[in-house]
Amino acid sequence: MEPNDPRHKAVPSSFCRAYCLDGLDDQKDNPSNLIGRTGYSSGNNNNFKNSNTTLTNKRSSFGYPTSLFRVTSTSDGKLYALRRIDSAGCVSHKIIQNVLNMWMNNSRSDDMHHCNHNHRSSLFQHPGVVAWHKCFISQRAVFFVHQFHVGAVTLKERFFDPNHVNNNSIRGSNVADLGLPLNPGPGVPLPESLIWSCFTQLVSAISVIHRSKLAVRTLQLNHILVTRDGGPSATSSSSYISGMNGNSGLLFPKLRFRINCLGIVDILEYETRKSLDDLQMEDMRSLGCLILSMTTGTEVTINDITLRNINSISPSQEHQQQQRAMGMLNHYSDFVRQHYSRELHSLMETLVNPNVVPPVIEDVARSMTTRIMEELDGAHSCMDGMNGALAGLYESGRALRLMLKLAFVNERPEFGIDKNWSESGDCYILKLFRDFVFHQADGAGRPVIDLGHVVSSLNKLDAADEEKIVLASRDGKNILVVSYADVARCLEKCYQELCSNSV
């Protein structure tokens, strides 16, 4: 954001370098349009009353005016996702403290003892969730601080937003060419291997949360973050999964799925919270809706299958809505049965059927042990790819150290009168070797830039190879025949002597 952007006033002073994450598409086309999508109203925030910019009162899925920023903490210098929620008058410091203690105390189980010590500052740590760090009240608004993941988009944006799907690597191709079925929704159904990958990752996170006597409450498409897995190895075959029904001819990027916005609903709806059993049951229903959405390409929420908001309608209208909901479920169920495996269809049916109590997360995990092992194999392959990339970077570092040593040793003016650093000493060999590696020329005296020769020579020097090479002076009068091992010994001797005399 520009330094004079009024939205800087919406960020507490403990954070800096704020960047608004709302309305990124509008910002690309017209930066002035983004101001109206920050979720603030001049009537709700006095800090903006003197601004010439019109700020609208945009509500999020939580029911309150919300704005999201990428910020840098002034205390540790790390990036965080800062979510500001206005007009939440029902939230108090006591409620925040109670919820924070609930997540902090319940997460300190044996399962959490294996977490990375670098993440101990977060309230709940798991590879399948976006770490929640803290919550506080400032400027008459509630702020939630979560981990920031670079390049992350929501599951809804990735696969259900037409503007994003057109540029997506999975859904950017023709449906028929990919072998994916035509679906009843506006999007494109995902390959089954990708659905199982997403499902196993979410089940792992939900299992830990439920076992800690907590509930997720944010299992919706717009609260699941998707990132590309593998980092530098993302282009290797180990970072891809097969296409529809295990078709190995179709490869799709390996993706990581994380549950976002933990704790927000617990704080905003603290006064009207339900029992833990009801909340965990809703999590399972929402998990089934995620499967149904990903298989049909149509966003399905828990409200669509449970008909919650029907208190203000007549019995006849209620009956019509129930019939419509059951018809929709039957239609989508038939589609899943025809295009996906029986295992996936059966699991989806047990989770979304409103007439049957959904299974608990432990039963779901036990029923998909084979899929969990497949996901574990994929995770290990991804780790092997990243270890290979790290090994390559480490080898590049070895060559850099050799070049630094040569640069430190060669032609130091303060040792010009010392015979060991003169044209006849050990450093003379290093000077000629430097010319042999970096100053090659052809018969006409034109410079030769051969990166392969440089890399090969440095690798042999690092290994102290016994291979002989011919080193010639620039005037051609002196010629030496030495091995890479001889050069390595001279380099190490001169460098150690230089280090012993350094300050």
Image (cartoon, rainbow, N blue to C red):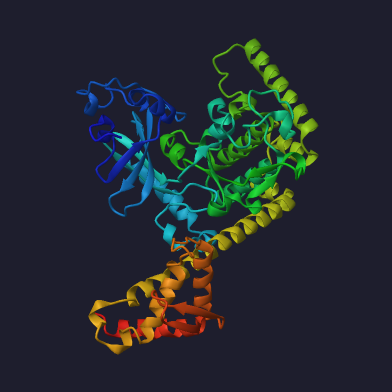
Farthest residue to the left: give it. Answer: 50
Q: Residue at x 63, y 23 (%)?
A: 186
Residue 336 in sight:
yes
- State the quadrant of the C terminus: bottom left
- Given residues 461 and 279, the one toward you in this image is 461
Q: Can residue 402 be seen in this view?
A: no
- In the drawing, does residue 6 fall left or right of residue 217? left
In the image, 37: left or right of 160?
Answer: left
Q: Which of 148 and 236 is in front in this view?
A: 236
Residue 106: % across, % down: 48, 53
Residue 436 vs 133, above or below: the answer is: below
Q: Position of residue 293 (x, y in %)?
A: 64, 31
Task: Tell me where residue 396 appears, x and y as whole percent.
Answer: 48, 65
Which residue corresponds to the image point at 52% horizontal and 67% vertical from the top-left? 453
Left or right: 386, with 357 as reference point:
left
Q: In which quarter of the image is the N terminus?
A: top left
